[in-house]
Image (cartoon, helix red, strand yellow):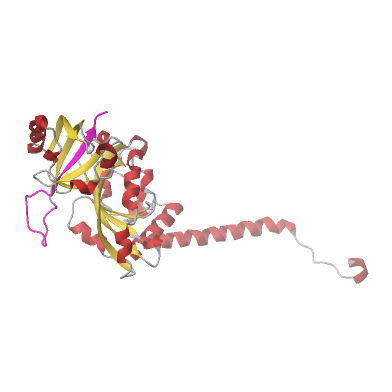
Amino acid sequence: NRGQTGLSRPSLDLSLTPAISREAARKRRRVETDVFEDLSRLLPLQPSVRSHLDKPSIIRLTLSYIRMHTLLKEEVNMYLRVMEGFVMVLSTEGDMIFLSDNVSKYMGLTQTELMGHNIFEYTHPCDHEEIRHNLRLTYICRFFLLFSEDVWCSQKRDFVMRIKSTLTHRGRSANLKSATWKVLHCQGRAKVCMASSAASCFLLTCRPLPLSHTLLSTHTFTSQHSMDMRFTYCDQRLASLLGYRPNELLGRSIYDLCHTLDTNCLNKNHLNCNQSVSGQYRMMVKGGGYVWVESHSAVIPSSRPSRSRPVTHQPLCILTVTYVLR
């Protein structure tokens, strides 16, 4: 056809194609690097931290800060001013949207190492069901949405979990492969958004407890008590272990469930519960009879005093981990 029409295509110098491609690739990389550097400078982190971030980390942290800003705005700073411990914000799927930068003081792991990852990657498998239970939005939260599109749910979240810690006994940070388990007491509430379920989250304050991580298993339950040992909270494992629903014990004394012959053992633990172990005693089962248990207890101290909070030496409650002996 070219011979018939007398037309011919312009010749292409193939020797220039690789050079053009390399230059185009270099230009794309320069533009990409500039974009990531600009994005990194916008993150509210120390320059020394930003300088060590790779591109996936910059994306992960940017997304977390965007979600945190949209969801919480000033609430996190308010929590930090009145508490000991660190703040953690979780999505309903367990994504760690935000952790306050003082998390490294308690866990060894830094804010940038944890944000954007899922809580289930760092917590003990035996605690996953309890965490999932606390991440569910209850009917009460859904009821509040009838009156507002963006609400704080009044129902509290209060649970204990084990999480990886790289802190050594000397306070230094070890490698993640050498991490141990630390027991955290987590308290907070849910923020529910009608417009998007992805915008719902849980704002938690996390305080490390002086309890052994080995106590928490499928045969244990955690409870909180007033200073006279009346139940103020029980976790869901109580039902499968002793037959009681958690709300059945609220306001009752633990002495009501203890065998008469073992009250002295329990009383000794109560009087020395800054951190103490009860020894074995018998606890009543709902369907009748007793099981042998052992309780480890610790006093949860009051928050650090501030201008808006007067100095007080009154503890908040007694946290107990009870092991049902099999």
Q: Using the rendered view, name the quadrant where residue 286 is placed.
A: top left
48 shown above or below 292: below
Query: Between residues 264 and 107, which one lies in front from this camera angle?
Result: 264
- The question of residue 201 being in magenta is answered with no
Q: Residue at x 90, y 71 (%)?
A: 5
The image shows residue 245 at horizontal and vertical percentages of 25, 45
- What is the total number of numbered labels drawn onto the structure image? 0
Query: Between residues 181 and 100, which one lies in front from this camera angle?
Result: 181
Visible residue check, residue 21: yes
Look at the magenta stretch and give its main secondary structure.
loop
Query: Between residues 94 and 255, which one lies in front from this camera angle?
Result: 255
Visible residue check, residue 191: no
User: Farthest residue in the right direction?
Assistant: 4
Query: Between residues 150 and 164, which one lies in front from this camera angle?
Result: 150
Q: Using the rendered view, name the quadrant where residue 127 is placed.
A: top left
Q: Residue at x 34, y 61 (%)?
A: 68
The image shows residue 49 at horizontal and vertical percentages of 34, 52
The image shows residue 191 at horizontal and vertical percentages of 31, 61
- The question of residue 325 being in magenta is answered with yes
The range drawn in magenta is 303-326
Rendered-image quadrant of the N terminus: bottom right
Rendered-image quadrant of the C terminus: top left
The image shows residue 135 at horizontal and vertical percentages of 33, 52
Side of 42 where 311 appears, left or right? left
